[in-house]
Image: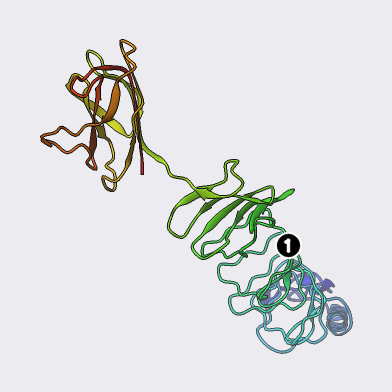
Amino acid sequence: MAYTKYSLTPSSNTAAPPDGAPEGMLPSAVNDTMRDMMAQIRDAGDGIRDGTYTMTAPKITGGTITGATFTGNTFSSPVISGGTINNATIGATTASTGAFSTLSATGATTFSGATVANTFSSSGATITGGTINSTAIGGTTAAAGKFTTLEATGVTTVQAGTAALPAITTTGDTNTGIFFSAADTIDFAEGGTAVGQFDSSGNFKFNSGFGSVGTAYGCRAWVNFNGTGTVAIRASGNVSSITDNGTGDYTVNFTTAMTDANYCVVLPSMVTNGNTSQHFGVSTPSNNSYASKTTSAVRVAVYNTLTSNQDVFDANIAIFR
């Protein structure tokens, strides 16, 4: 439409007729100018009413626009009643099918039968009903589903399981894993057979070829040392040092103390001269001047007669409780 050749400032419309009305124009030019203005007014009116109306810098401050189609970049802060956007009904209770590149909502947003592709991100979304990877959302018992990574910040509960079908297992080996046979008890299965357990008292039990799971009584301390000359530890566990009290008389000091003195001491040895009559035992002198077993140490002696002690070359001591 050529009406844009006119200026919004009346005094600026001084172009040659019929594009303007300059001062002193001929009377015959007045008719031409008026007829041109009439045509432009009709053209603009027809475009607004029935055709396509293109505005280079539109500004609408009020009124009602009915049945209009807007094409272009940005339409800022409008109040639109009725009609559609991308085939979605504006203001309808149920929106028609539509696609949005970006959808942002500051209040409550309800999706019914929606499909979300790729990423759905929200800091406080509430999703009621529906499924994720065929797993029911909010269901009492979830349907089967698979997640590449599953992370939970709270308590995660699984079924108790059995030795044949452990509650926690791995793909392709479902009869090996962890199950829970009783309260406060953790069990381990391998090939459908129970092979280990932490019972409700904190005892560890295992099956090491004996046919059933039994309590494992651990060695609480052990040592191998040379008791001749300057006493020297070859290897040990939970033993801090050996005290040489004299010929064939030693105190084994524990790194971590025993719970009590009711432990078992195993005492094999080999003396330097191959004497076959040597004895190795927990030392308890007749005058009872010292205790042989405490929670922090045990005193042992080697002797080849009832009265003669003898140093040992290869002393081996183990403590069980």
Q: Residue placed at 26% from the left, 45% from the top? A: 261
- Which quarter of the picture shows residue 113? bottom right
State the residue in front, 35 or 101: 101
Left or right: where does residue 305 sit relative to residue 49? left
Scheme of image coloration: rainbow
Which residue does the image show at 71% across and 84% down from the upper left?
80
Instruction: Give coordinates of residue 173: x percent, y percent.
Output: 72, 48
Number of marks in picture: 1
**In percent of the image, x 66 and y 53: which residue is there?**
169
Q: Nearer the viewer, residue 39 or 289?
A: 289
Q: Is residue 270 left or right of residue 83?
A: left
The quarter in which the C terminus is drawn is top left
Q: Nearer the viewer, residue 80 or 22?
A: 80
Residue 12 lies left or right of residue 290; in this view the side is right
| Looking at the image, residue 132 lies above or below residue 53 | above
Q: Against 262, is 3 above or below? A: below
How packed is label 1: few (under 14 Cα within 10 Å), some, or many (20 or more)? few
Q: Position of residue 110 (x, y in %)?
A: 68, 79
Residue 50, position as x, y percentages in the image = 89, 83
Q: Quadrant of residue 244?
A: top left
In the image, is residue 297 above or below residue 30?
A: above
Q: Quadrant of the N terminus?
A: bottom right
Furthest toward the top, the residue is 273
Q: Nearer the viewer, residue 64 or 4?
A: 64
- Quadrant for residue 124, please give it: bottom right
Question: What residue sits right under mark 1 in the picture?
Answer: 145
Is residue 295 found left or right of 194 in the rendered image? left
x and y, in percent, of residue 311 in the image: 24, 17
Mark 1 is on which residue type? Gly
Secondary element at tag 1: loop
